[in-house]
Image: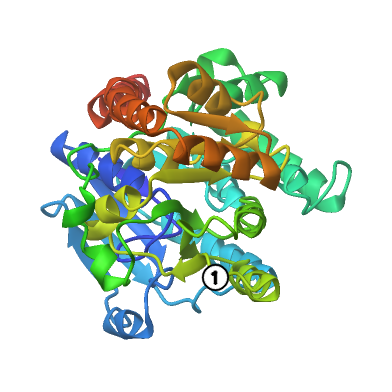
Amino acid sequence: MKILLLPNYFYPERYAGWHLEHDIYELLSISGYSMVAYAPMPSRGIDSEIRREYKNRYKEFFFNGKLLLHRFPLYAENKSSILRAIRYTISIIIQFMCGLFSQNIGLLYLESTPPIVGIIGGLLHKIKKIPFVYAVQDIFPDSLVSTGLSHEGSLAWIIGRIIENFTYRNATRIIVISQDFKRNLLKKNVPEEKIEVIHNWIDTTSIFPVERYNNTLFSEWELNPSLFYIVYAGNFGNAQSVHTIIESAQLLQSETDIQFLLIGGGSQEDTLKELVISYKLQNVKFFPLQSSEKLSYVYSLGDVGIVCCKQGVGKNAFPSKTWSYLAAGTPIIASYDLDSELASMANSNGFGISINPENAQEMADSILKIRNNKQLLQEMSSTAKTFVEAHASKEKAMKRYLQVINSVISSN
C-alpha cells in the first residue's frame, strides 16, 4: 500500500513552505509508509544550469527509497499569470492521469497549490475509492477576491467555489493551518469533524539565530554590519503587498542607518524594482532566493523581519516565513489584517508589532520605535525564539499529522 503525492513543486525547486512538504514526506517515510509522487520537471527558483541538469531525470528515489518521484516534462514557470495558469492546468491533467493508473494506492495526500488541484483529489477519491487528505495552505477562491484579482459573483469566483465545494465534499479529512481557516470552512458548511487545525511549523535545528559576525551574507552581499536592517524574505506576489515596504523605505530615506533588504522573487519583482528606481531610493537592495542551507543566515540577517499582505488577505493566509523569522530570533512587524490570527499572536505574545496592512506610515513608525529602543528589540528577539519553540515546533506538528494520516488509513 502506497501514499500518492501530486506536488506542483519538488526538490531542488525553491518555494515558500518547501520545508513543510519535506518534513511531511520524511515523517511518512520513517513511519514505514511508501510513497509515489508525480511532479513537473523543476523550474521554480532555480537557474538554467540546474534545469539542464534535471532535464532527463525522469525518476528519482528519496528518503532511503521510500519515496519514488516520477517527473514529467513541462515548460518552465514564469511571471506571466496566464502562462502559469495554463501550466497548472496541464500539470494537473497529467497528474490526474498518472494517479488514475497508479497501483496499490491506499491514501491520496494533496496540498492546496495550485488551488485547482483539489479537482484531482475529488475525482481520484470517487473513481478509485481511496481516502483523500487535503492540506489547505490558501483559501480559494477567497484569496482571489482579497487580492483584488477577482470579485464575488465573477466567473472565476463561481468556478472557484464549485472547485472548492467539490474538493471539501470529497476530502476524507481537511488539515488547515489556523483557526481563521477553520472558521472560514465552517461558514461554508464543511462538517467540523472533517477539519483538523495544525499550524505550520519550523525545525529549530535547521533555522536558528546566527550572530552577525558569523553571518557570511554580510560579506557576500557587502553589507555594513553596523547598520539597522529590515528584511523581507519571500514571494514578491500580488497578495504580499511588498510595495508597502518600499513606500516605508521612502519615508525613512533620511534615516541613513536603516536599510531594507528584499530577498526573493515573483510576479511583482520587476514592478517593485521600477518603483525603487522611480523613488530614487538608496536604502533598498534586492537579493535572490537562497538555498535551504542558507536560510538561517537569511532570517538572521535583519534586526526586524516583515510579514505583509494586502488588505483583506490576512484571514485567508498564514505565511510560514513568520516561524522562520522567529526561529532565527528576529522580531516581526506584521502588516496584516488586525482581526487575523497572526496579528493577535504578535500583539498578545510580544514577538512583534501588528499594524494595518498597506500602511507605509505605520510601518515606518514601528521601525523607528524598535530602532530607538534597544531593550524592546532585545525583549522581542528573546520572546520570538521562546514562542516558536513552544508553539510551532516540528515535533508537535509531526505528531498531529501522523495521527491524522494513521486514523484515516485505519478507518478506510
Residue 392 visible: no
Residue at 40% x, 41% y: name it.
108
Residue at 84% x, 46% y: name it.
151
- Secondary structure type for disc 1: loop
The answer to whether residue 246 is above or below residue 361 is below
Q: Nearer the viewer, residue 284 or 82?
A: 284
The answer to whether residue 85 is above or below residue 177 is below
Question: How busy is the neighbourhood of tag 1: few (under 14 within 10 Å), some, or many (20 plus)?
Answer: some
Give residue 142's quadrant in the image: top right
Residue at 65% x, 59% y: name it.
250
Q: Position of residue 333 (x, y in %)?
A: 52, 38
Residue 327 visible: yes
Q: Nearer the viewer, residue 113 or 239?
A: 239
Q: Position of residue 130 (x, y in %)?
A: 43, 36
Q: Quadrant of the N terminus?
A: top left
Provide the residue designation for mark 1.
282
Q: Position of residue 65 (x, y in %)?
A: 13, 54
